[in-house]
Amino acid sequence: MSVFHYYVVAAILFSIGAGGFLLRRNILVMFMSVELMLNAANLCLVAASSSFDLARGSSFALVSIAVAAAEVGVGLAIIIAWFRLRPSVDAGDLQELRG
């Protein structure tokens, strides 16, 4: 398979993630959509690094995965703390967090 096929799959994954983030109101689904977009970017990085025989893209993808794992930990902690206060994970309810 050529690199183009990987880019097409990454574009489809990114489009699904962007659509899920823009169209859904559930915070958990929005959070998963952001992770899907990050995975699409990682797929592009790894595909590019394999096509040019460079290790930089793979190392950037590894760093991106580590940052995404930290984001998941902090993001889920915030969502759980919010859910304990209000039993709803609707994005419209987060308007109350403004100062």
Image (cartoon, rainbow, N blue to C red):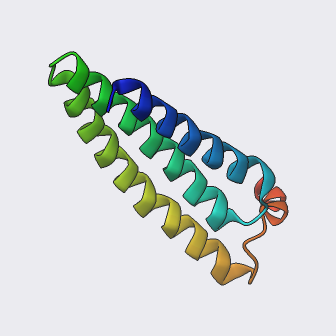
Question: Residue 74's quadrant in the figure?
Answer: bottom left
Residue 20 rendering spot, x and y as whole percentages? 69, 53
34 over 49 or under it: above or below: below
Residue 93 rendering spot, x and y as whole percentages? 82, 66
Residue at the spot 40% in from the left edge and 34% down from the top edge: 6
Residue 25 vs residue 19, the one in the foreground = 19
Most extreme residue toward the top is 52
Residue 89 rendering spot, x and y as whole percentages? 72, 72
Left or right position of 26 against 40: right
Residue 83 vs residue 31, the one in the foreground = 31
Q: Is residue 99 visible?
A: no
Q: Is residue 41 visible?
A: yes
Residue at the spot 31% in from the left edge and 23% down from the top edge: 48
Question: Residue 25's quadrant in the figure?
Answer: bottom right
Most extreme residue toward the front is 1
Q: How many marks?
A: 0
Is the N terminus in the top left, top right, bottom left or bottom right quadrant?
top left
Left or right position of 34 against 5: right
